[in-house]
Amino acid sequence: MKIALIISIVINVALLLKLLVMRSSLKELALDYRERVALDSDTLIGVSSRDRRIRELASAINDTITEMRGAFHKYRQGDKNVRNVITNVAHDIRTPLTAICGYLELASRLDKSPEMAGYLDIIGERAEHMKSLTNDLFEYMVINDMEVPEESQDVNINKVIEDSVMSFYPSFIDKGIKPEIEITEERIVRKLYPSYVERIINNLISNAVKYSDGDLEITLSDSGVFTIANTASTLDTVQVERLFDRFYTVENGSATSTGIGLSIVRSFAEKMNCPIKAEYEAGRLIITLDF
């Protein structure tokens, strides 16, 4: 009876030790897996356990990691090739487009019939739109492939907003917009990238002008929160949720979105760690950027 009890205890202790060893091996395997996934290298999981099933599991995980890395490398190389092609095409298109716009300007100065003048105006509008799209596309590809091209420095947010608002006054007049501006007297200075901040503000105001039903509110709070809001009856909640998506376009009568301007805004904001969001409340588009 005692011998049977001793044997049972020995077996139980052996099983417990086996279980503890397997548990330790699985923990080691999980930790090693997390490290290998996080690292951008071709190293695989190593396992110290001599248990056949643990080693088979490690081998299966290594096969999966190898397949995933192979697929990722193909995706990254393919994405890089596509970006290079788009960047090169955008760059090549800009030169002839600039020439076309120049010749259209010369043609507009010549004597011509009203009908011909109308045709030239239409061609000029289409050429300028394509030029703007090409410039945005080129810039978007460049900023997503390269590091920030300038050093961060103290940027006076108040002044950037004021300068941008002034530059858009002709557009406000054309659209019949009377903007309500409320910029804090507190001097908001942040260490950011000047050209990025300027482009963000310009793109946001340009977008607001494009979709506004005639009103526009621009505010900068004491804490550095920039808000731009306008009534936009042509939009809806689903469209607003996708405004920052790459190449997402919204039809708005004669106004056509390239789908890049706000994508650039988000990209620049993320590079500067400035949270940005778009909301749609009671028919109003509200974009908030926290500097």
Image (cartoon, rainbow, N blue to C red):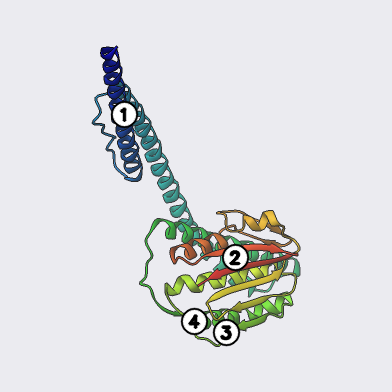
Q: Label 3, label 1: how many angstroms apart (C-alpha)?
A: 63 Å
* Amino acid, disc 4: Ile
For disc 3, the marked residue is 184
* Amino acid, disc 1: Met
Q: Label 3, label 4: how many angstroms apart (C-alpha)?
A: 8 Å
- Tell which circle, 4 or 1, labels the residue nearer the N-terminal end: 1
For disc 4, the marked residue is 188
* Amino acid, disc 3: Thr
Crowding near pointer 2: few (<14 within 10 Å), some, many (20+)?
some
* Left or right of 18 on screen, residue 270: right
Q: Secondary structure at mark 3?
A: loop
For disc 2, the marked residue is 128
In contact (CB < 8 Å): disc 3 and disc 4: yes
Q: Secondary structure at mark 2?
A: helix
* Amino acid, disc 2: Glu
* Left or right of 80 on screen, residue 286: right
For disc 1, the marked residue is 22
Q: Label 2, label 1: how many angstroms apart (C-alpha)?
A: 68 Å
Q: Secondary structure at mark 4?
A: loop
- Tell which circle, 4 or 2, labels the residue nearer the N-terminal end: 2
Which quarter of the picture shows residue 239?
bottom right
Q: Residue at x 61, y 78 (%)?
A: 219
Of the two numbered discs 3 and 2 in the rendering, the one whose residue sits closer to the viewer? 3
Q: Position of residue 54 (x, y in %)?
A: 31, 26
- Tell which circle, 2 or 1, labels the residue nearer the N-terminal end: 1
